[in-house]
Image (cartoon, rainbow, N blue to C red):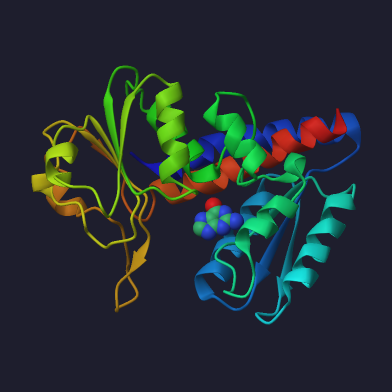
């Protein structure tokens, strides 16, 4: 499954709609990203998000704060963005430095501008099947599965990893689409037995090439959410792509799989947030 190709399709649609909305309202969607410190990966991700936002016709800004910024200062910065009527989407790139309470920061973001879908109110809405802004990576996975017409209803989906950003929300979304869902994690016993029963496998644990062919059922669909860097600087996923690809019905590569879809869904969420605010 080619995430780059599907991301282009989604972004073309967003670009077209954005132009129409700008014409109709005289306002332009604006996405502001806040990044704290000099974490190279975080800096790279927010720049990619800004670039993609500008490409679809949004205004986008990155606020770079020093690693030693206090929690109070960061919260004040978010409050200002909440009050800024020209800003429609706010994201704070994670992880944050240890001295800052991530949960407090997420809760500070205006729920209508929370384009990451991390605010507890949105998490709650998702868990009871209400519409809100869904977290971008899981939303991108669902979009990919739909694009490739992968049947979800009635299938056994196994999620490896229970993070708030990927594992828990993707489990909820698959459940809403009538999959039978198992969430596994570091303390799961008999993991191989469970993964070998999976029709759809979502791997999001941050361990390079963790999922090998012996853990996968013939004909399964495998989604690799991992982004790991080798010592040589190469990007690799949580799945041993070369070993697994011959055995499965469909698989996402790293890079070029889930990553580009995450950015597309962020743009989609920003456009939804913009529409709700200006309507
Ligand atoms: N860190 C890793 N993934 C994400 C994401 O989707 N959003 C934000 N804000 N930070 C992240």
In percent of width and height, residue 260 lies at 48, 49
Residue 77 placement, left or right of 83: left
Q: Residue at x 58, y 38 (%)?
A: 123
In the rendered image, is residue 147 in sight? no
Q: Which residue is more in the foreground, 71 or 247?
A: 71
Q: Is residue 14 above or below residue 31?
A: above
Quadrant where the N terminus lies?
A: top left
Count of labels shown? 0
Residue 203 placement, left or right of 77: left
Q: Is residue 224 above or below residue 158?
A: below
List the single residue furthest toward the left: 214
Q: Is residue 89 above or below residue 218?
A: below
Q: Residue at x 30, y 57 (%)?
A: 237
In percent of width and height, residue 215 lies at 13, 45
In percent of width and height, residue 200 lies at 27, 33
Q: Is residue 45 above or below residue 250?
A: below
Q: Which residue is more in the foreground, 48 or 73?
A: 73
Q: Residue at x 74, y 37 (%)?
A: 273
For residue 149, what is the image quadrant?
top left
Q: Which residue is more in the foreground, 55 or 162?
A: 162
In the rendered image, is residue 222 in sight? yes
Quadrant where the C terminus lies?
A: top right
Ligand 1 in which quarter: bottom right
Residue 154 placement, left or right of 277: left
Residue 232 placement, left or right of 193: right
């Amino acid at each position: 499954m080619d995430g780059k190709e599907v991301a282009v399709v989604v972004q073309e649609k967003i670009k077209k709609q954005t132009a129409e909305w700008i014409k109709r309202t005289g306002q332009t969607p604006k996405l502001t990203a806040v990044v704290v410190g000099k974490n190279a990966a975080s800096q790279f991700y927010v720049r990619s998000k800004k670039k993609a936002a500008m490409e679809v016709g949004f205004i986008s800004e990155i606020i770079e704060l020093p690693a030693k910024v206090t929690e109070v200062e960061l919260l004040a910065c978010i409050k200002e963005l909440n009050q800024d009527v020209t800003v429609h989407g706010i994201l704070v790139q994670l992880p944050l430095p240890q001295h800052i309470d991530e949960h407090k920061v997420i809760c500070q973001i205006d729920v209508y501008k929370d384009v990451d879908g991390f605010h507890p109110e949105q998490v709650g809405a998702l868990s009871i099947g209400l519409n809100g802004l869904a977290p971008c990576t899981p939303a991108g996975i669902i979009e990919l599965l739909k694009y490739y017409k992968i049947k979800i209803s009635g299938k056994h989906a196994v999620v490896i990893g229970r993070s708030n950003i990927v594992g828990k929300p993707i489990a909820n979304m698959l459940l809403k689409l009538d999959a039978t869902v198992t969430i596994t994690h570091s303390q799961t016993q008999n993991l191989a037995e469970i993964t070998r029963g999976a029709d759809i496998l979502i791997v999001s644990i941050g361990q390079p090439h963790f999922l090998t062919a012996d853990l996968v059922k013939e004909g399964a669909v495998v989604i690799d959410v991992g982004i790991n860097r080798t010592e040589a600087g190469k990007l690799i996923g949580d799945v041993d792509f070369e070993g697994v690809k011959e055995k499965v019905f469909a698989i996402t590569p790293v890079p070029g799989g889930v990553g580009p879809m995450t950015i597309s869904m962020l743009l989609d969420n920003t456009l939804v947030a913009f529409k709700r605010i200006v309507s």
